Every structure is written in structure tokens, then in C-alpha cells.
């Protein structure tokens, strides 16, 4: 059906210029946002808590995940979606722990989008009541704009990066609920200024939660797991409330 | 370069509108881009030309209307204008700001034949 009734400028009139202005008023990311809403509904139906991990390349997202999924896999069903431009190295590192992982290669793409995550989720085993970790492409710019349907974004920042990174890449730090400061075991040799980093992060996002961890030594992970368990309990509570 | 993906989104919208409202040529695509959105307007223009090349929007001009960034300052209890996310409140100098506007990335209107 071709419905032109909503056309504010009307159809071209014979003999007059056919040029017209059409009011559109549509979000550029509308399609991605609709697909993200579909993902979110599926995660909710499966009672799955989904996290979108973002960072610059080399901050240690995969090492952090390898440790986390190894130590959480006996408590929750866990799945991982790995985003990289090329290679399946990261998914293989996760699978070596015994946890299911799907690698998404974005090719030239600099971020995961909601369609990719929906397709990857189809290929994971059923995570009923479990946790989905989505490791985004290492990039502090583009992934900020693309909702994947996650419960929240976790930004991983490492002590080897400059303290002012939250100011340089404010969109990402503004979009994240939790900042994990990784490689904290290296802080003493780096003259890393933790207080300054946190201050900068809270300038762009006053509500961001902050934790320090070391994927190498395991320092700080128990607090991270406690945070995950709190989020998970909240999800369960909401689910029970919804069921009455 | 997520501007590439955003431009593909714009072309998708233009093509859908072309089917719905039956036009075959686009002269101008007008966008509304917030000062605090995820877009560099110059990069957007560069990518648009490349992405539009083999579509109905080929040769169309991209016009970008930039909307200001606004935030609610919790300390001042008032709405203020900011240019960047890391800027302090222009009144009190604090950072207790909640962004309320300027994150838009929209196709506002099209000039078509």
C-alpha cells in the first residue's frame, strides 16, 4: 500500500516545480535502537544479565574476562560475544576456560552493532538466568553510540593509559555505569594517579562507579563479582515483581 | 569511523522515505546533530558523499544544523549550556551536571524532486 496522506508537502502539481520539502524527524540510529530493544527483550525473557565491555585496545578486556568467567562459571550460566575486526583469538581464549564464546568479526567496522549481537546470541547456548559478556571492539569512540541491548556498559581503563583519558574520550565514560581500572598492580611503577583519574571520570559522569582490579593477580575481583551479584539480584527481583 | 555506519543509517532512512512518499531524487538532506552527540560534522560530510554515491541520494547536499548541549546543574538547580561533556557548570564551576540535551542525531528533513 502506498499511503501519501501523511506527506505534508503533498504531491507534485503539474506545471510547477516538483521540488518539495519533506519533514522526516527520524533518529539516525533508529534502526540500531529498535534492534537493541529486541535484544533487550530477549535478554529479559531469558533473565540474562548482559554487560557491554568497552575500552581502548590493550586495556586488558579479554584477560579480565578470562579470569572473571573462569571464576564465575560455576555460579552462573555464562556466554561471551567477542567483537574484533579480525581473528578469533579472543573467542578461543574464552573457550579455553570451558565457557561458550562466539566471535564476531566486524571487518572494517569499528564497533559492534545490535544486529551483530542478536545474531551472535542466537548461536550461544541458552543462558537461562545467566550472564552475557559482550566484549566490544577495542575503541573508545565508536562503540559509545551503539546500544546493543545491554543492561549497562562497563568501561575498562588501565593504569598504563593517561589519567586524562576520560576527558579525551568523554562520550564513552559518560555512557558507562562502571569503570574498572585494570593493571592496578603496575600502579606503583607508573606513578599512576588514581585520584585524578577518578576525578576526571566523574567530571564527565558524576554517577560512574569505580573499582580497581588486576586481571594478572586477581586483586579487586571479589568486589567486581559482588557488584555483578548485586546487579543480578536486582534483575531477579524485578523479574519476580513482574511475575507478581 | 562510525560516521560511515551513521551515513548508512541516513541512506536507509532516505530510501525508506522515498518508497513511502514516492520521490526519486534528493537534493538536500538536513540533519540535526547535537553538540554532545557522537558525531564530527566534517567527518559526516566526507563519509556521506562516499556512502551516497550509488544511491538515490547521490549528489545530495548534506546540511547540518547543530543544536547546543544543555545540562541540569544539580548544585545550581538550573539548566545551563555546555559545549563539551567535560566542561564545568558556567555558573558555579562544578561538575555535578546531568546532560539534558544536545545528544540528538536525526534526519530532520529532505528536499526532494
Image (cartoon, coloured by chain):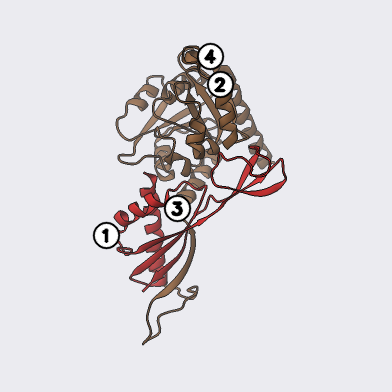
Chain colours: A brown, B red
Please report the residue visible at 63 percent of the width from the left and 44 percent of the height from the top: B90
Report helix, strand or loop for mark 4. loop
Residue A31 circle label: 3
Name the image quarter holding the C terminus of chain A.
top right
The residue at which mark 1 appears reads as B54
Marks 3 and 4 close (CB-CB < 8 Å): no
Q: Earlier in the sequence, mark 3 or mark 4?
A: 3
Report helix, strand or loop for mark 2. helix
State the image quarter where residue B63 is shown.
Answer: bottom left
CA separation, marks 2 and 3?
Answer: 39 Å
- How many numbered tags mark residues here? 4
The residue at which mark 4 appears reads as A219
Q: Nearer the viewer, mark 3 or mark 4?
A: 4
The residue at which mark 2 appears reads as A194
Report helix, strand or loop for mark 3. helix
CA separation, marks 2 and 1?
Answer: 50 Å
Residue B23 position (above or below residue A59):
below
Amino acid at each position: 500500500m502506498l499511503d501519501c496522506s501523511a506527506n505534508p508537502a503533498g504531491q507534485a502539481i503539474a506545471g510547477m516545480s516538483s521540488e518539495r520539502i519533506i519533514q522526516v524527524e527520524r533518529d539516525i540510529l533508529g534502526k540500531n535502537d529498535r534492534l537493541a530493544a529486541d535484544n533487550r527483550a530477549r535478554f529479559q525473557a531469558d533473565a540474562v544479565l548482559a554487560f557491554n565491555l568497552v575500552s581502548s585496545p590493550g586495556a586488558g578486556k579479554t584477560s579480565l574476562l578470562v579470569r572473571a568467567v573462569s571464576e564465575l562459571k560455576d555460579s552462573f550460566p555464562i556466554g561471551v560475544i567477542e567483537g574484533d575486526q579480525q581473528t578469533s583469538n579472543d573467542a578461543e581464549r574464552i573457550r579455553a576456560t570451558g565457557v561458550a564464546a562466539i566471535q564476531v568479526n566486524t571487518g572494517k567496522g569499528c564497533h559492534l552493532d545490535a544486529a551483530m549481537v542478536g545474531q551472535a546470541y542466537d548461536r550461544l547456548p541458552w543462558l537461562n538466568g545467566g550472564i552475557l559478556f559482550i566484549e566490544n571492539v577495542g575503541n573508545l569512540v565508536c562503540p559509545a553510540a551503539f546500544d546493543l541491548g545491554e543492561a549497562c556498559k562497563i568501561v575498562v581503563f588501565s593504569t598504563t593509559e593517561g589519567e586524562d583519558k576520560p576527558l579525551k574520550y568523554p562520550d564513552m565514560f559518560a555512557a558507562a555505569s562502571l569503570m574498572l581500572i585494570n593493571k592496578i598492580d603496575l600502579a606503583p611503577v607508573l606513578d599512576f594517579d588514581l585520584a585524578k583519574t577518578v576525578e576526571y571520570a566523574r567530571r564527565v559522569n558524576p554517577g560512574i562507579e569505580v573499582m580497581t582490579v588486576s586481571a594478572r593477580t586477581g586483586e579487586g575481583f571479589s568486589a567486581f563479582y559482588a557488584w555483578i551479584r548485586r546487579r543480578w539480584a536486582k534483575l531477579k527481583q524485578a523479574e519476580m515483581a513482574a511475575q507478581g | 569511523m562510525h560516521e560511515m555506519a551513521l551515513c548508512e543509517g541516513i541512506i536507509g532512512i532516505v530510501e525508506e522515505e522515498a518508497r513511502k512518499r514516492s520521490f526519486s531524487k534528493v537534493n538536500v538532506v538536513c540533519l540535526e546533530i547535537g553538540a554532545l552527540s557522537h558525531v564530527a560534522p566534517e567527518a559526516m560530510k566526507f563519509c556521506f558523499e562516499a556512502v551516497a554515491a550509488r544511491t538515490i541520494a547521490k549528489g545530495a547536499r548534506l546540511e547540518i544544523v547543530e543544536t547546543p548541549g544543555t545540562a541540569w546543574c544539580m548544585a545550581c538547580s538550573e539548566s545551563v549550556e555546555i559545549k563539551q561533556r567535560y566542561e564545568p557548570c558556567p555558573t558555579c564551576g562544578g561538575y555535578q551536571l546531568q546532560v539534558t540535551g544536545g545528544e540528538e542525531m536525526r534526519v530532520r528533513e529532505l528536499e526532494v524532486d
